Image: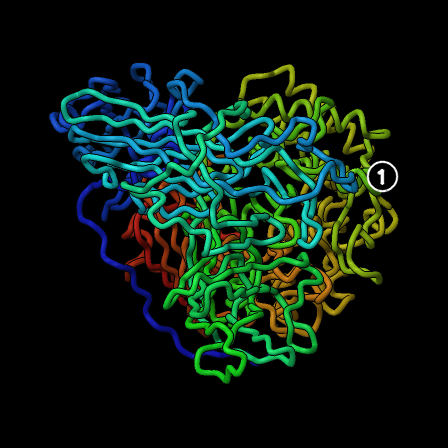
């Protein structure tokens, strides 16, 4: 691999900053101006922006009003907090008058800093409440086109269970006409559609969401979505139009299409309430009931696993617009209600990047294959011209067979999109209710425009891929002088984006299931790049809904299918279920979400009790172990690390975490109980797995030693020796990795924390052995399921993407103190390894942007950092006793920057908020 060498340094620059104390990024429940807030005590936050250094908030005042005009007069008729002496600027709990369902509230804040400055009032923002109870739905009914008999419902099947029936369902459309004679001040829609819905008002789609609402454990919880429809309502006749798709709610048991499982909760149905608030102060409601009309729609097949069929000849022009004649439609059927309705507070799915065709190739069977250049989750957009009744079939795929055709062997087959033309001049279509992971599109029954077409087949006028993902905000960036690491970062990022839906999926095609180990193992990598606070809270709720009566947290959540084969190893595996304890803790550490700790504590306690009952002499040996490690056999269940090592290590880690949570919640008796049990587990772990002669755990695998180090299972007197043995094992393999899904994150964490990022660099700065560079060399454009980029497994998985965390915490050095949350106390400790001579990037924390940018030269080191207001940082600069250190061209003494220590070749400084430019001259 070629190495790029620079022999010069260049100046670093930052953008200009405002000169006054300002407030920005005001949020309620971690969303700007959220709709559908479903808590009586919403959490509020803000960021402070200033050009001054060392700014710490000393006090704040919040005003909340139910009318914007009152707030403009600096009055809070719902809540006036008064001046509160506090540094807290995130997770501030609303403490005003009781909040009303569906009501909109306006708020603003001002702050004071410890220099005596005031921000003045922020710009006003708002939140709108959701619906809390059945009565808040004002008599709305669940309505459907048809009802599935209760005896055919199969909502929680075991794997391998036979179908109760076979066949397709009818995908309905609904319409409701209503009159508006007054001037509308605000129109708010609360709507749920199972499995997914798309809504229009007067022929225009409402919003830009895809696959609303988020999929859940439908027998326990259903999400609804809130829309502001004010701009779409007109005087006179208005029409609400709703289309429904199946999603995970109903997986059609059609034999000729792929399906992972035979889950059936029922036929599609919907419920909604539209609230019209008028300028004269009155209001009215339009609710779903038997007065709505319904008909079969043009989507004739919808499966989250099998694809989607659309017959354009079944379109009814103007069906969702005024003046349409719906006399031939039948009345909607009121049906039984679903489980608890809760607001969709995680970000919705949306369409992001568009992929134009990079190249196309004709196959021997007269099919055409299009290459979009990027493997990603998504759908297609088709523009075609042909005769009425002509049929196209589009087969998406990650890989190609030897003959150039679409290869779905490892991604779920057969999956396809089918479109029947209506014979218009040009027809444009894209699927609404299914998606897949693909790079290639094989077209059957059509010819690209301009190509030879003796059979007069339809002409493809345009084709592109549309990447769909959860709309979590991007909040991180990384770049370095190492091109392989930059490409690795992109490789992992595409796998993350492709698997961020309303759950974190394992893959965007054959399963789309929420395998839980990824939440805690890949969580830090994802959090450095995306704000997933709300998505993690949704994942925690999925775990609560999926927990069994005996306390088990199954390996997937929502649990749509019970994987009971193979001695239950795919259902009961501690490294997966432990997300129920680890994820709420990480949520607290990264975002300050203490409320979720209290709400999740009962779930954690039940799972700890379950693990205790399953353990034999405190050792947990069930499950999958270090899944997909690199051993002599094809990847799967742990090969190099004996069963019991990873499960028991995680069990001990769980106990240390729940003890800390119990302490935070003031549960002193629980603290004692969990600490005692943790010591017993630690003793059993060392007694069972540690060899005092060799100073190795179990087989001495990378995973076994690394997890013991990271979880603090190693007795202090052996710590250094075990670390050295971990390094020796890696070097004995010519710096190649062997750890799998569970172990590799802990290999990286242990090495970084022990100051051995040089070993991490050597392991990953290569493409000649299985790993990230190897996958790139084989042409992967998203992280693959196996280190070897095998063609017979998924080529879009994010479970092995742990190196991304090191790019931020190691190379950029952006970390936080163990004693604080949400990066209130920041650490900037960049690791200078290999031939990397510069790295730059940023992470958008709850308090603001943390930036780290450095360059290494022969005789100097240059670092620029940004530390958000209301935080502080400890900075580590590579130096010696003879080094000269300046900041902004002046000595540290002049700049009043505190030196803490010189340790392990680094000068340690303490700084406040602001922008800094350090230069170390050797």
Residue 825: tell me if it is visible.
no
Q: How many marks?
A: 1
What is the secondary structure assignment of the residue under circle 1? Answer: loop
Q: What residue is disc 1 on?
A: 567
Residue 662, horizontal then vertical, whole percent: 59, 22
Residue at the farthest front position: 328
Q: Is residue 643 left or right of residue 390?
A: right
Q: Is residue 732 left or right of residue 776?
A: right
Q: Is residue 275 left or right of residue 798?
A: left
Q: Residue at x 53, y 73 (%)?
A: 370
Residue 689, horizontal then vertical, whole percent: 84, 42
CA neighbours of label 1 inside 10 A, class few (<14), some (14 to 19), many (20+): few
Residue at the farthest left position: 73
Tell me which corner region of the image, top left, top right, bottom left or bottom right, holds residue 612.
top right
Q: Nearer the viewer, residue 544 or 379?
A: 379
Residue 783, horizontal then vertical, whole percent: 60, 61
Residue 172: tell me if it is visible.
yes
- Figure quadrant of the N terminus: bottom right
Q: Residue at x 31, y 33 (%)?
A: 177
Q: Residue at x 68, y 78 (%)?
A: 403
Q: Is residue 434 above or below residue 621?
A: below
- Colour pattern of the rendering: rainbow
Q: Is residue 779 left or right of residue 915?
A: right
Residue 922, horizontal then vertical, whole percent: 44, 68
């Amino acid at each position: 691999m070629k190495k790029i060498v620079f022999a010069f340094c260049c100046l670093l620059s930052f953008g200009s900053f405002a000169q006054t104390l300002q407030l920005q990024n005001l949020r309620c429940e971690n969303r700007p101006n959220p709709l559908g807030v479903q808590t009586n005590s919403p959490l509020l936050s803000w960021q402070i922006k200033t050009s001054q250094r060392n700014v710490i908030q000393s006090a704040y005042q919040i005003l909340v009003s139910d009318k914007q005009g009152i707030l403009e007069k600096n009055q809070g008729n719902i809540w006036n907090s008064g001046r509160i002496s506090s540094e807290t600027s995130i997770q501030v709990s609303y403490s005003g008058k009781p909040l009303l369902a569906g009501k909109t509230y306006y708020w603003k804040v001002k702050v004071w800093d410890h220099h005596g400055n005031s921000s003045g009032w922020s710009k006003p923002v708002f939140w709108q409440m959701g619906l809390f109870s059945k009565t808040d739905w004002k008599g709305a009914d669940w309505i459907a086109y048809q009802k599935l008999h209760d005896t055919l419902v199969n909502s929680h099947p075991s794997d391998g269970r036979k179908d109760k029936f076979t066949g397709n369902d009818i995908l309905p459309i609904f319409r409701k006409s209503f009159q508006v004679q007054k001037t509308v001040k605000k129109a708010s829609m609360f709507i749920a559609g199972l499995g997914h819905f798309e809504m229009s008002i007067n022929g225009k789609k409402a919003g830009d969401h895809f696959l609303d609402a988020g999929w859940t454990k439908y027998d326990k919880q259903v999400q609804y979505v809130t829309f502001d429809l004010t701009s779409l309502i007109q005087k006179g006749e208005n029409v609400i139009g709703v289309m429904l798709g199946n999603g995970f709610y109903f997986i059609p048991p059609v034999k000729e299409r792929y399906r992972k499982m035979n889950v059936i909760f029922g036929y599609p149905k919907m419920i909604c309430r539209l609230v019209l608030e008028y300028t004269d102060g009155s209001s009215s409601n339009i609710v779903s009931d038997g007065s709505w009309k319904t008909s079969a729609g043009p989507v004739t097949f919808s499966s989250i696993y099998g694809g989607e069929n659309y017959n354009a000849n079944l379109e009814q022009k103007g069906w969702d617009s005024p003046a349409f004649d719906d006399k031939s439609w039948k009345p909607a059927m009121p049906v039984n209600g679903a489980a608890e309705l809760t607001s969709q507070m995680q970000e919705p799915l949306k369409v992001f990047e568009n992929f134009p065709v990079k190249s196309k190739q004709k196959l021997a069977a007269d099919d055409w294959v299009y290459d979009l250049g990027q493997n990603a989750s998504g759908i297609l957009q088709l523009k075609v011209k042909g005769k009425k009744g002509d049929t196209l079939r589009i087969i998406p795929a990650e890989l190609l067979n030897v003959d150039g055709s679409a290869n779905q062997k490892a991604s779920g087959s057969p999956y396809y999109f089918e479109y029947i033309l209506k014979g218009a001049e040009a027809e444009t279509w894209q699927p609404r209710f299914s998606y897949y992971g693909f790079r290639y599109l094989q077209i059957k029954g059509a010819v690209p425009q301009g190509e030879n077409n003796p059979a007069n087949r339809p002409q493809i006028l345009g084709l592109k891929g549309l990447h769909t993902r959860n709309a979590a905000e991007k909040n991180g960036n990384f770049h370095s002088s190492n091109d392989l690491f930059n490409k690795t970062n992109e490789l992992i990022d595409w796998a993350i984006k492709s698997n961020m839906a309303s759950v974190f999926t394992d893959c965007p095609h054959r399963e789309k299931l929420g395998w839980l180990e990824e939440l805690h193992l890949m969580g830090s990598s994802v959090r450095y790049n995306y704000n997933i606070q709300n998505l993690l809270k949704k994942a925690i709720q999925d775990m609560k809904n999926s927990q069994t009566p005996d306390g088990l947290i199954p390996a997937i959540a929502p649990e749509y299918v019970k994987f009971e084969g193979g001695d239950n190893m795919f259902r009961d595996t501690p490294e997966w279920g432990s997300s129920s304890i680890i994820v709420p803790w990480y949520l607290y550490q990264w975002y300050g979400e203490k409320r979720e700790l209290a709400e999740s504590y009962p779930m954690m306690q039940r799972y700890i009790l379950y693990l205790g009952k399953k353990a034999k002499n405190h050792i947990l040996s069930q499950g999958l172990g270090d899944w997909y490690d690199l051993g002599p056999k094809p990847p799967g269940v742990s090969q190099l690390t004996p069963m019991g090592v990873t499960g028991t290590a995680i069990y001990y880690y769980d106990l240390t975490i729940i003890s800390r949570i119990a302490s935070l919640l003031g549960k002193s008796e629980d603290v004692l109980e969990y600490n005692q049990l943790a010591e017993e587990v630690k003793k059993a772990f060392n007694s069972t797995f540690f060899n005092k002669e060799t100073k190795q755990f179990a087989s001495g695998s990378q995973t076994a030693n690394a997890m013991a180090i990271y979880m603090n299972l190693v007795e202090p007197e052996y710590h250094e020796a075990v670390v050295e043995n971990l390094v020796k094992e890696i070097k004995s393999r010519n710096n190649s990795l062997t750890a799998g899904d569970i172990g590799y994150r802990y290999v990286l964490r242990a090495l970084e924390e022990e100051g051995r990022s040089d070993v991490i660099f050597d392991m990953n700065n290569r493409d000649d052995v299985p790993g990230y560079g190897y996958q790139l060399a084989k042409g992967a454009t998203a992280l693959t399921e196996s280190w070897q980029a095998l063609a017979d497994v998924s080529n879009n998985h994010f479970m092995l993407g742990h190196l991304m965390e090191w790019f931020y915490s190691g190379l950029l050095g952006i970390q936080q103190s163990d004693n604080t949350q949400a990066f209130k106390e920041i650490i900037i400790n960049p690791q200078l390894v290999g031939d990397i001579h510069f790295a730059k990037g940023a992470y958008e924390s709850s308090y603001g942007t943390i930036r780290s940018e450095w360059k290494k030269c022969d005789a100097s080191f240059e670092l620029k950092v940004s530390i958000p207001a209301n935080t502080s940082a400890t900075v580590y600069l590579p130096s010696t006793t003879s080094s000269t250190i300046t900041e902004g061209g002046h000595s540290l003494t002049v700049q009043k920057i505190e030196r803490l220590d010189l340790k392990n070749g680094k000068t340690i400084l303490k700084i406040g908020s602001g922008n800094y430019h350090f230069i170390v001259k050797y």
